[in-house]
């Protein structure tokens, strides 16, 4: 893996970079559409490519349960199984184990849990999780970590942090050939724990670093504080990944703080529920004001939905429960997010990121 820092904004910590991996390259800052089970919900692979997606995120926990790693390995790996020619980052599934599993028992050795699908019991060690992702053949892999919800005591946060660090070290002991292994900084909303966790993981020299355990119920100001503290500590020559944060205003704030990579289910989840992101803010397309609105979702957007269909038609699709509606709005939202990142990279390259951010948000929030 190679990460090149191409440009640093003079007035903020925003960075322009290029990440080169065995399976391809990507420009940063970048947004990764979430394809949890090997598919970005309601959006086809060709539509993702047309929208400019360089990488998608899939989830090892879900793929381990269905269809099973053996099937994907027989297919020639995850890229071939889902017919995705570009980069893939796989999340370890740590968060899903803690949030979805019916029953779980966490020890320093690993996690025993019951599948939320069929109740079958599984036990996974950090080494198992890396082995699963090796078999998937993803380009960037994440170690098993323990995520605590907000609020939690400092004692709980420290226990989870220590376990995350221990599991990261054990994950690093697994031999990898062409895959990049990132570490995950935990520590809840405790500044000293975040700093300690970051430094101990930096000393282990991972390929990249993620900020985990955010968007778990904490107030936005505490999240911004955590990102600000951790991003300043992380190595300048390694990519920085903020996990699970995905509203436009939050992404733009984190870019200003020096973050390079983002993922979130927001674009497709909102799209399936009839909410579209536009240059003038969010709109809920199923609402009555759009009955006779023959404008595109976003006049400034060049996606297929905006070039071909009106708000009135999209509203009709949602109110008649036609699946095409949620497909078109989900596709539009992905296009909106990826286009925003193109604009972000262009603004950083031009040395006007803060100006761009201000202009974008003034229009978006009007």
Image (spheres, grey):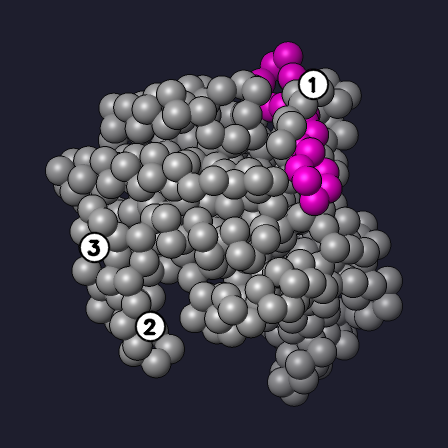
Q: Quadrant of residue 180?
A: top right
Q: Let me know if residue 210 appears in the view.
A: no
Q: Which mark is residue 88?
A: none
> Would you name the residue on which mark 2 appears?
115
Mark earlier in primary sequence (3, 1)? 1
Q: Is 363 placed left or right of 104 in the picture?
A: right
Q: Residues within 10 Å of mark 2 (few under 14, many from 20)?
A: some
Q: Percent x, y for residue 347?
A: 73, 27
Camera-nearest residue between 69 and 315: 69
- Residue 165: name its quadrant: top left
Q: Which quarter of the image is occupied by the C terminus?
A: top right
Instruction: Name the chief secondary structure element in magenta.
Output: strand
Q: Is 310 situated left or right of 208 in this image?
A: right
Callout 1: SS: strand
Task: Please tell me whether mark 3 or mark 1 is closer to you in this view.
Answer: 3
Residue drawn 70% across the image and 44% down it:
23
| Residue 243 place in picture, x, y as percent | 47, 44
Compare residues 118 and 292 and report the one nearer the observer: 118
Instruction: Name the secondary structure under disc 2.
Output: loop
Work out how far the residue at label 2 is from the one at label 3, CA to CA, in angstroms.
15 Å
**Pick the front one: 260 or 124:** 124
Residue 13 forms part of the magenta stretch: yes
- Residue that label 1 marks: 7
Q: Earlier in the sequence, mark 2 or mark 1?
A: 1
Q: Which of the 4 image quadrants contains residue 27?
A: top right
Task: Examine the rendered structure and indicate whether residue 40 appears above or below residue 10.
Answer: below
Q: Could you tell me if the residues under marks 2 and 3 are in contact, i.e. CB atoms within 8 Å?
A: no
Q: Residue at x 66, y 32 (%)?
A: 19
Q: Is residue 72 in view?
A: yes
Residue under circle 3? 106
Q: Which residues are magenta?
A: 7-26
């Amino acid at each position: 893996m190679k990460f090149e820092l191409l440009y640093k904004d003079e007035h903020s910590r925003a960075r322009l970079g290029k990440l080169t991996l065995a399976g391809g390259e990507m420009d940063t800052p970048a947004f990764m559409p979430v394809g949890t089970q090997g598919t970005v919900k309601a959006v086809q692979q060709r539509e993702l490519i047309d929208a400019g997606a360089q990488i998608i995120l899939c989830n090892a926990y879900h793929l381990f349960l269905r269809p099973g790693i053996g099937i994907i390995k027989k297919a020639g790996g995850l890229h071939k199984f889902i017919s995705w020619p570009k980069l893939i980052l796989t999340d370890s599934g740590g968060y899903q184990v803690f949030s979805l599993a019916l029953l779980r028992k966490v020890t320093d050795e690993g996690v025993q849990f019951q599948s939320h699908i069929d109740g079958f019991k599984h036990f996974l060690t950090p080494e198992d999780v890396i082995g699963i992702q090796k078999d998937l053949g993803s380009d960037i892999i994440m170690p098993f970590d323990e995520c605590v919800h907000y609020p939690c005591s400092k004692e709980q946060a420290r226990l989870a942090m220590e376990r995350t660090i221990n599991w990261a070290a054990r994950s690093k002991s697994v031999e990898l050939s062409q895959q990049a292994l990132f570490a995950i900084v935990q520590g809840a909303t405790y500044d000293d724990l975040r700093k300690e966790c970051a430094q101990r993981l930096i000393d282990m020299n991972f390929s990249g670093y993620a900020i985990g355990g955010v968007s778990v119920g904490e107030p936005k100001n505490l999240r911004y504080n955590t990102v600000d503290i951790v991003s300043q500590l992380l190595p300048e020559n390694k990519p920085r990944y903020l996990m699970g944060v995905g509203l436009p205003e939050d992404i733009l704030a984190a870019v200003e703080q020096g973050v390079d990579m983002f993922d979130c289910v927001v674009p497709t989840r909102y799209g399936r529920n009839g909410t579209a992101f536009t240059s003038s803010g969010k709109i809920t397309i199923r609402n009555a004001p759009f009955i006779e609105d023959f404008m595109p979702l976003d006049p400034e957007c060049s996606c297929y939905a905006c070039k071909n269909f009106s708000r009135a038609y999209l509203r009709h699709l949602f109110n008649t429960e036609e699946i095409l509606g949620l497909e078109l709005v989900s596709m539009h939202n992905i296009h909106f997010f990826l286009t925003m990142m193109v604009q972000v990279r262009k603004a950083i390259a031009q040395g006007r990121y803060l100006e761009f951010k201000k202009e974008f948000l003034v229009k978006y929030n009007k």
